[in-house]
Image (cartoon, coloured by chain):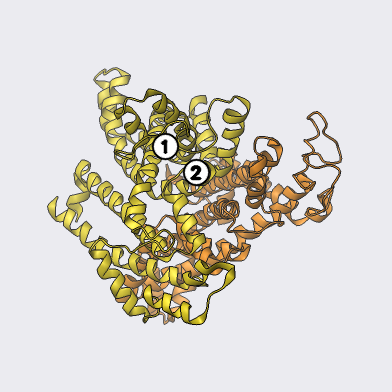
Amino acid sequence: MTVDANAVQETDPEAQGLAARPMHPLVEFWVYFRESRGAVAGMAVIAVVVIVAIFADVLAPHDPTEQFRDSLLTPPVWAEDGSWAFPLGTDAVGRDMLSRIMHGARFSMVIGLVVVTLSLSIGIGLGLVAGFFRGVVETLIMRLMDIMLALPSLLLAIVIVAILGPSLFNAMVAIALVYLPHFARLTRAAAIGELSRDYVTASRVAGAGLPRLMFSTVLPNCLPPLIVQATLAFSSAILDAAALGFLGLGAQPPLPEWGTMLAEAREFVLRAWWVVTFPGLAILVTVLAFNLMGDGLRDALDPKLKRS
Amino acid sequence: MFRFAITRIAVLLPTFIGVTVIAFSLIRLIPGDPVELLAGERGISAERHAKLMQEMGLDRPLHEQYLTFILDVFQGDLGKSIRTKTPVSEEFFALFPATVELSLCALLFAVAIGLPAGVLAGVRRGKVFDHSVMTVSLAGYSMPIFWWGLLLIILFSGTLGWTPVSGRISVMHFIEPITGFMLIDTLLQGNYAAFNSAVRHLILPAVVLGTIPLAVIARQTRSAMIEVLGEDYVRTARAKGLPPWRIVGLHALRNALIPVVTVIGLQVGLLFSGAILTETIFAWPGIGKWLVDSIHRRDYPSVQGGLLLVASTVMIVNLIVDLLYGLINPRIRHAR
């Protein structure tokens, strides 16, 4: 893909007296995306996290729940008393930090995926319906979304989790619900913008039914802002799920979810810095990577910025 | 301007009603009822259970309960906490200043650093300073603040021993609340030792809570600055030979501030989400911690009233920001 992109960019069609052939959208996207070093770095980090998440069973030196009773709160390998058996040290019940963080990557990726999928699909549905059937339906949907936006997101998520009961899955549902308004609003705005275009009229005149108009004609043209928002929601979901875990409302111990690990580590904050530092660092790096990639995606997908 | 204000307020009313419905119904969907919870593990006889439910009005049909609720709300009565038997509004407003004090200091910290950093980064676009500001602010934006709080505790309270770990003020001092703002109350009472203690308690939570807004403000200021610096009138000012600080400080900044004001206003909802976490980490006796505790205790009226008051605060602040925005940017209010 890189080779193709180079070729397209470096052969100047005008110099050769040829008409410019439009780049394949994916190639064009990559050309713009590659310009942002941060975005590429973010993507690389995400790739690493995904690989670690998939192969956590093989890569992790120990089982994440195995308790080594004779080495409680062992510091990391470079500190005094550290050992290579536990490169990042152990927690208060003697579990290997590195293995727990590696398995934690799994939870974070799943959280991001589930939240974004739920929120995106329902949000797109609501947004399209609001955009297509203006009037009462639109008012109802958009008012509801406004109300949800009036409540602080974490508070709303906490209340929803309190209703459903604290667990990882319920935390994901709560976060997905909280993110819904953003996707619904974006879709509606984009759909309304597209609906007045000629190609939609043409498709309508040609006899396209409503579902076809919605999902096959209009939706693909609304995707760029949604993709950017989805990436950013992925990172926020990881962050918020960790926050819920930290408050005891998300994943429950002994699951090695990063936020839950931090909650367990809280009482050792002044005695064993490593049990606090590493899970948080894992959250920060992963979230940062997604945000970097989101920024790059925005620049690459935003036609307004491209022209300048 | 008047029309603009009226339309904005009119839009708010249905939203407010909606919030009351959500606050009312969400909390009733929570499994378990408050009577069972109050009784605890010992359990409670069926008759006594029914009697208590009746006393609290929890046995009536939902729509009746809601009607009572909303009528009371419009009279300023949010019910009594099941746990402490004190009016919810009283509890809320006793703790509210703590959260406001913390949030204001956090916002002050965010603006004091974020604004100049954003302006400088915009002016030196593409330079090392710009890149570092952008990197640091993106990291700040991605920060799990509950972890950030713990890290700062390790460093400043643990290793350096500079700041206390939790609370609003040292137990050595007793401060009679006047305004509810610890910093002001201690000064009013001329107790400088207590003021010093309050400041040291406040610094870490304010920094933690202000981190994400700081990042957002710095990024927004930078991009607004870049946009404004490309305008014709800035070029004119340059061509006139104005000194750079005048161009940036007077001509550009004034216009760049318009979107920044909006963004600062939008931080209020975010600040509240952050306050929940920050108050939990630092055992800060504010609204966030109180609400989470109320949810755990299934104190229906407290959660209901608290949710409503929080949402109202956020909505009112957003309204004020909206109006301010219309005031400083005439194009907005004439567009309607």
Q: Distance between the residues labelled 1 and 2?
A: 11 Å
Q: Is residue A179 visible?
A: no
Which three-letter amino acid code belongs to the residue tagged 2?
A: Thr
Counting residues from the start of the chain, the first of labels 1 and 2 encountered is 1
The residue carrying mark 1 is B106
Which three-letter amino acid code belongs to the residue tagged 1?
A: Ala
Which residue is at 43% across, 35% downward? B218
Nearest the eye: B141 or B133: B141
Secondary structure found at label 2: helix
Q: What chain does mark 1 sit on? A: B
Vertical placement of B83 versus A104: above or below? Answer: below
Q: Where is residue A124 in the image (x, y as percent from the top left)?
A: 47, 68
Which residue is at 66% across, 50% downward? A258
Nearest the eye: B79 or B10: B79
The residue carrying mark 2 is B278
Vertical placement of B320 versus A112: above or below? Answer: above
Q: In this view, does B253 lie to the left or right of A114?
A: left
Q: Which of marks 1 and 2 is in front?
A: 2
Q: What chain does mark 2 sit on? A: B
Q: Position of residue A56 (x, y in %)?
A: 78, 53
Q: The orange chain is which one?
A: A
Secondary structure found at label 1: helix
Look at chain B in the picture and name its colour.
Answer: yellow
Q: Where is residue B109 in the image (x, y as percent from the top left)?
A: 41, 32
Q: Is the residue under label 2 in contact with that under label 1 (CB below 8 Å)?
A: yes
Question: Label 2: how many residues lie within 10 Å, few (<14), some (14-19) or many (20+)?
Answer: many
Which residue is at 62% across, 44% downward? A42
- The C terminus of chain A lies in quadrant: top left
Vertical placement of B164 versus B1: above or below? Answer: above
